[in-house]
Image: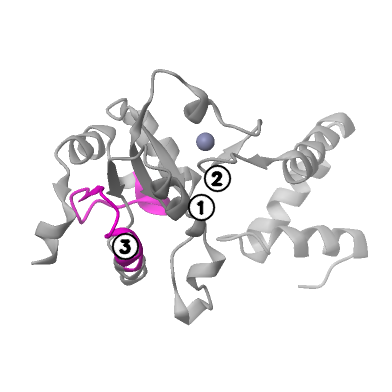
Amino acid sequence: MNFSSRLLENAVTEFSKLPGIGQKTALRLVLHLLNQPTQDVERFSDALTRLKKEIRFCEVCKNISDNSICEICSSRKRDKSLVCLVEDTRDVMAIENTNQYNGVYHVLGGLISPMDGVGPSDLNIDSIVERVKAGEIQEVILALSATMEGDTTIFYLYKKLKDFPVKFSTIARGIAFGGEIEYVDEITLGRSIVTRVPYETSLR
Ligand SMILES: [Zn+2]
């Protein structure tokens, strides 16, 4: 692409680094922003800068949070003996939207993927081991996507945690998760949490 302006080119380059955004789309978005009032564009860039600088992760469940302990972990209404292990914050949002789950979460921050150079130490795994070790948790729901990375991660976690006195369960496999969640309706996801099955059964 030949740009008439270096400033325009810089902005398009930054936008096209986003997932799913090609150069043409990036150019369209940048030109759109250019047509907006200055204060709108400032609000846009300010929201991103503040998001990155001020965002925190819950000290307990590692979910994105405005406070050191998130609302779910600090709620007295939630069942702290039940923890749902998920890949990222999108999964927490999807499960919360079902209104079928009253336990707490643990956000791994990704899945084990040797191909992408992601190992167990890159994920929030030590912290879930510590939580289980602390003794309050009685059931761990392994709610990761039905992919090779999801399976690898589930098996790794199971090996790490299986000697503690906790139950393991999984949601119905084939339920698309995270990035694919928009294709799953809330009723299906909610039902799969309610009808979760013991993990040991699915190993056979
Ligand atoms: Zn939390």
Relative to residue 197, is residue 101 depicted above or below?
A: above
Q: Earlier in the sequence, mark 2 or mark 1?
A: 2
Dot 2: element:
loop
Q: Disc 1 marks which residue? A: 127
Residue 5 visible to the viewer = no
* Horizontal relation, residue 20 to residue 67: left or right: left
- Report the mark closest to the observer, 2 or 1: 1
Q: Disc 3 marks which residue? A: 154
Q: Is mark 2 within 8 Å of ligand 1?
A: yes
The quadrant where residue 37 appears = top right
Relative to residue 160, is residue 78 depicted above or below?
A: above
Q: Amino acid at mark 2?
A: Lys
Q: Which residue occupies the foreground of this view, 18 or 150?
A: 150
Q: Disc 2 marks which residue? A: 62
Q: Which residue occupies the foreground of this view, 118 or 125?
A: 125
The answer to if 61 sits in the magenta stretch is: no
Crowding at label 1, few (<14), some or many (≥20) Cα neighbours within 10 Å? some
Q: CA distance from mark 2 to mark 1?
A: 9 Å
Dot 3: element:
helix
Q: Which residue lies at the image location 69% right of the left edge and 52% below the top edge?
A: 28
Q: Which residue lies at the image location 17% right of the left edge and 43% below the top edge?
A: 196
Provide the residue span drawn in magenta. 156-182
Crowding at label 3, few (<14), some or many (≥20) Cα neighbours within 10 Å? many
Provide residue 170's location: percent of width, then percent of height.
22, 51
Q: Amino acid at mark 3?
A: Ile
Q: Is mark 1 within 8 Å of ligand 1?
A: no
Q: Which residue lies at the image location 7% right of the left edge and 67% below the top edge?
A: 204
Provide residue 142's location: percent of width, then percent of height.
30, 52
Q: How many discs mark residues in the rendered view?
A: 3
Provide residue 16's location: percent of width, then percent of height.
68, 63
Q: Earlier in the sequence, mark 3 or mark 1?
A: 1
The answer to if 174 sits in the magenta stretch is: yes
